[in-house]
Image (spheres, rainbow, N blue to C red):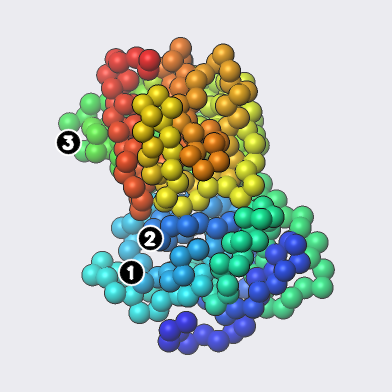
Amino acid sequence: MNGIQISKKAYLVLSNGAAFEGTRIGADGESLGELVFTTGMTGYLETLTDPSYCGQIVMQTFPLIGNYGVIPEDFEGKTAVKGYVVRELCDEPSNFRSEYELDKFLKENGIVGLCGVDTREITRIIREEGVMNAKICDEIPADISDICEYRVLKAVETVSRKEPEVYPAEGEKKFRVALMDYGAKQNIIRSLQSRGCEVTCFPESTKAEEVLASSPDGIMLSNGPGDPEENTAAIAELRKMIGKAPIFGICLGHQLTALAMGGKTVKLKYGHRGANQPVKDLIGGRTYITSQNHGYAVVAESLEGIGRETFVNANDGSCEGMDYPDKNCFTVQFHPEACGGPHDTAFLFDRFISMMGGERNA
């Protein structure tokens, strides 16, 4: 660390028994969570404020974090991470938009962090052995049973808003969109607003009847954290909405739609997190670079005869998109609203707009 006046030693202890000594950053205390890594070179603020990281200790693979400081305008939501691990934390940011340094953000938001560990080695362990739990603590514990037994539970319920909120369209209002908030990133809302949509965000527990009673021109299903199969009530309500209005689902919304249609999901070995995930369009043949953050994937074969697979991950072949033409519905695993990240697939929002304008999802 370059000049931060903190020298308190701490450890990152993995559920496989490995321990890494580093230096404390952020808030005091211990933190227990599912350890995941993200490969983004930029976008650490969006990562720290993405509700989809609920219950997880996030590790950045890029070695220097915090160099452009904290810019509240770029936040995606309320922080939900359980901990933060970096190789080196910059305490003297250089950016005209920066308001303060990252360590202050971590302290103010109660995020326990660690720096000075070999993030490259830890990433290799996760890639070889699969995602695992970890704990940030002052001493290496003799008993790590609490680390091994940790589970991310009720994540969507934790991060979803509690009351409906309305966001006005930018310029002329063309459509009304009902956004199901499973842990929605703010840029999904902004992407719809900029296209003339008034967006009403509904809590994840909202009944289908209430959503449909708002007479939406389309329904947006947001990203979110945790195991998609845990959300049985949300899946049941979504099942009632499918086919009643054009639907566009992103990330967890993609997974919940598959489950509502009778499909299956599976946990990936270590997930896809970062702004450089290649996705192949099975219809057009083009490959796009996308931003992603998920640990589960839809099993496309489980939806045979129900929907058609439209995108696959070019690295591991996992499902990245599904179309349900008979239901006027399509979903993707990646983030077309990426911020920070590539905007290669932002055209999917325009496709949703066209569907609300009367064009069928063919």
In the picture, the disc for residue 171 is 3
Query: Residue 324's mark?
Result: none
Counting from the top left corner in percent of width and height, residue 356 is at 31, 21
* Residue at the disc numbered 1: 68
Instruction: Tell me residue 344's x, y (percent).
Output: 32, 41
Given the image, on which type of amino acid does mark 1 rest? Tyr
Q: Earlier in the sequence, mark 3 or mark 1?
A: 1
Mark 2 falls on what kind of element? loop
Instruction: Look at the numbered disc 1 and give the secondary structure of its residue.
Output: loop
Q: Is residue 77 left or right of residue 208?
A: left
First of labels 1, 2 by sequence position:
2
Q: Earlier in the sequence, mark 3 or mark 2?
A: 2
- At 82% from the left edge and 68% from the top edge, which residue is drawn? 143
- Tell me the kind of residue under disc 2: Thr
Q: Which callout, 3 or 2, points to the residue nearer the camera?
A: 2
- For label 3, the SS is loop
Between the residue at mark 3 and the residue at mark 1, the CA separation in whole angstroms equals: 32 Å
Residue at 40% across, 70% down: 66
| Quadrant for the C terminus in the image | top left
The local crowd at label 2, few if under 14, some if 14 to 19, many if 20 or more residues have their Cα within 10 Å, is many
Can you say whether 68 is above or below 269 in the image?
below
Distance between mark 3 and mark 2 Cα atoms: 31 Å
Q: In the picture provided, is 212 more to the left or to the right than 125?
A: left
Quickly name the residue at label 2. 42
Q: Residues within 10 Å of mark 1 (few under 14, many from 20)?
A: many
